[in-house]
């Protein structure tokens, strides 16, 4: 009886520790791959409020709100979503004005290039 329970437990462990399906890993790989400059420019054409930062490893956008409290609330919203999605961002809040810079993922401690995921994150912000 005890060996049957041990077999069931090890079967459950194996099920839980299984790798994600290959298509999920492929999708993740595509989203995290550095984009060519041409692709970044194409995306920025449909996101006119965003601009490329010098060096091309990030994009930025400024917002001006009617009240500082609204700007602070939006800053917290962006920070929480960036953290949850593992997107490196810089947020600079000055009263009613917010500057957001979305960066590509870091590689060996240095800023990497922009990825599809980073651009989609910025696009969702507006």
Image: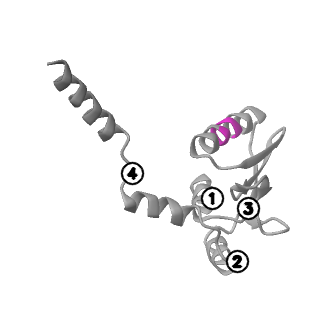
Q: Residue furthest bottom?
A: 38
Q: Whole-percent x and y of residue 113?
A: 71, 65
| Earlier sequence position, callout 4 versus callout 2 | 4
Q: How many marks?
A: 4
| Earlier sequence position, callout 2 versus callout 3 | 2
Q: Residue 55, relative to residue 1: is it above or below?
A: below
Residue wearing tag 2: 37
Q: Which residues are magenta?
A: 75-79
Crowding at dot 1, Cα within 10 Å, few <14 / some 14-19 / many 20+, comes out as: many
Instruction: Residue 77: say if magenta.
Output: yes
Q: Whole-percent x and y of residue 26?
A: 45, 64
Task: Describe the element under mark 1 as helix, strand or loop.
Answer: helix
Q: Residue furthest left?
A: 1
Residue wearing tag 3: 112
Residue wearing tag 1: 118
Q: Whole-percent x and y of residue 119?
A: 62, 62
Instruction: Residue 57: say if magenta.
Output: no
Crowding at dot 3, Cα within 10 Å, few <14 / some 14-19 / many 20+, comes out as: some
Image quadrant where residue 117 sits: bottom right
Question: Viewer-nearest of labels 4 and 1?
Answer: 4
- Residue 50 relative to residue 30: left or right: right
Distance, label 3 to label 1, CA atoms, is 11 Å
The N terminus is located in which quarter?
top left
Distance, label 1 to label 2, CA atoms, is 14 Å
């Amino acid at each position: 009886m005890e060996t049957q329970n041990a077999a069931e437990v090890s079967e459950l462990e194996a099920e839980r520790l299984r790798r994600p399906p290959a298509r999920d890993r492929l999708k993740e790989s595509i989203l995290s791959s550095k984009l060519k400059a041409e692709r970044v420019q194409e995306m920025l054409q449909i996101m006119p409020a965003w601009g490329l930062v010098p060096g091309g490893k990030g994009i930025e956008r400024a917002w001006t709100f009617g009240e500082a409290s609204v700007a602070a609330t939006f800053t917290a919203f962006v920070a929480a979503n960036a953290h949850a999605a593992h997107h490196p961002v810089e947020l600079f809040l000055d009263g009613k004005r917010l500057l957001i810079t979305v960066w590509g993922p870091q590689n060996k401690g240095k800023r990497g290039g922009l990825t599809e995921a980073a651009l989609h994150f910025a696009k969702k912000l507006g």
